[in-house]
Image (spheres, rainbow, N blue to C red):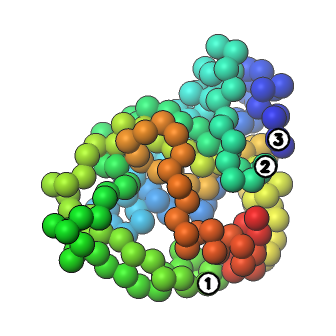
Amino acid sequence: TFGQSVAMGSRSADATPAISLDPFAARNFVEPGQDPQGKACIAFDKVEFTARVNAWYESCLAAGEDPLRAGYAPFCKHIFMPNFVDTLSDSVLSITEANIALLKSAYVSRTERELPVLTRWFPREMVKSQVRHARFLDVILYSREQIIKEKAARGETTDSDAPWGIVSVKPQGIDSEIPMEPITMMRNALGREHGGSGA
């Protein structure tokens, strides 16, 4: 819940981690033996990734710092931490006269039950030389209560008791929030039954 992380303090080694990787975010990870494609761009072990996020969270608490930054709603928080995945590039690229012709667009849904929405992107391989290495990770968290609500709207259940779940990871060049994509705002406003948060 809101502000819970500051009051919890450091956890014992056998306690439930504060943060788990939600299956919704797990789709961003490349499976062993596969090549990065589509949304799957994080070539890193999911268990180790989650452990490193938890270690950063705990180290901030131990130093008397709040590791969580406010998100767009009380149930949403951000952890900004140095990027430790060597192969991750910045997820943002400016549109210029030189690259605008490379933009692609299509109606895309992130899951089978989600409303497809018009999305645009640069094909990663076509702009590889223009993109810089990501300096930071924006690890986006939802509270367990919010995750339960959204999964219930889709007829799903959660298998974690961690107070926070990773729902997205954004590799980027700055340690602060990048503006949300307009299409994500629309999906959230449409509500949980369409794959949004309802906020």
Q: Position of residue 149 (x, y in %)?
A: 82, 65
- Mark 1 crowdedness (10 Å alpha carbons): few <14, some 14-19, many ≥20: some
In the rendered structure, find residue 19 and report the number of the disc placed on it.
none
Estimate the spatial distance between the alpha carbons at disc 3 and disc 1, rounded to whole Å.
29 Å
Instruction: Estimate the spatial distance between the alpha carbons at disc 1 and disc 2, rounded to whole Å.
Output: 24 Å
Residue 189 percent coordinates (x, y): 72, 73
Amino acid type assigned to the residue bearing label 2 in the image: Pro
Given residues 49 and 106, the one toward you in this image is 106
SS for dot 1: loop
Residue 50 is left or right of residue 37, and the answer is right
Residue in view at x 21 percent, y 77 percent: 101
> Which residue position is annotated with label 3?
2
Badge 3 marks a residue whose secondary structure is loop
113, above or below 75, in the image: below
Residue 157 appearing in the image: no
Give the labeled residue for mark 1: 115
| Marking on residue 74 | 2
